[in-house]
Image (tube, rainbow, N blue to C red):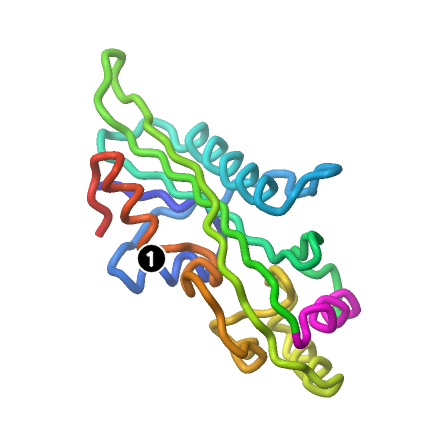
Amino acid sequence: MDIILGSGSPRRLELLRAVGIEPQVLAPDIDESVRFGEIAQDYVRRLAATKLDAVMRCAGAVGVGTIVIAADTTVEIDEAILGKPDDNHQAVAMLRSLSGREHRVHTGLAVAVAGPGCRGVEWQGHVEVVTSRVWFRTLTETQIADYVATGEPSDKAGAYAIQGGGALFVDHFDGSLDAIIGLPIERLREICAGLGHRLG
């Protein structure tokens, strides 16, 4: 069975490898801008679906049983979407806004499985959003500055990594840790099973 990960995220690759899956990686180049009036759930759903479509178009000939996986993750607080910070100043501002408060982490998950059809291979797909809730401890300015100085927040939605140094900021969470990191593995397995294929 061929598995294609439509993401350049090292976190998503690590999550798949942790359960014994070594996918082919195809990182699509898409516009990740937020559309006017777009809410966080719709945003990550759209990006995941767009990534999936881009990967399916560039993957070339595939065999029956090929699985394509795409995902996108963002942080939402007060209905504002917190993506990856543009610079250290924005990372500091994001962490200040999360300090001492609850926020939501939305991961758009898009999956397609190649099955037999009357014209050769035909795709079956599924797209959904997995939402988790995270509560931050109250952070000091020194804690924020020291964390931003490590460089870890630079490519993370909401400017923190729960699987890294950002774990120290988390009081507790409700939902899927894998989804907060970027790829809900158990839900992914359920979706693949529903499409008639076992993942891992």
Q: Which is more toward the observer, 62 or 107?
A: 107
Residue 125: image quadrant is top left
**Quadrant position of residue 186:** bottom left
Instruction: Say which quarter of the image contains residue 43.
Output: top right
Q: Residue at x 21, y 22 (%)?
A: 116
Q: Is residue 41 magenta?
A: no
Q: Which residues are magenta?
A: 89-100
Q: Position of residue 7 (x, y in %)?
A: 47, 48
Q: Is residue 96 left or right of residue 31?
A: right
At 32% from the left edge and 28% from the top edge, which residue is drawn?
Answer: 124
Furthest toward the right, the residue is: 89
Q: Considering only vertical position in the picture, is 50 above or below 133? A: above
In the foreground, 194 or 150:
194
- Relative image position of residue 82 (x, y in whole percent): 67, 57
Q: Magenta: predominant secondary structure element?
A: helix
**Looking at numbered disc 1 in the image, what kind of residue is underneath it?**
Leu
The residue at 38%/34% (across/down) is 126
**Residue at the spot of label 1:** 16
- Would residue 184 appear left or right of 143 to someone viewing this image? left
Horizontal placement of 69 versus 172: left or right?
left
Question: Number of numbered discs present?
Answer: 1
Residue 58 picture location, percent across and down: 45, 31
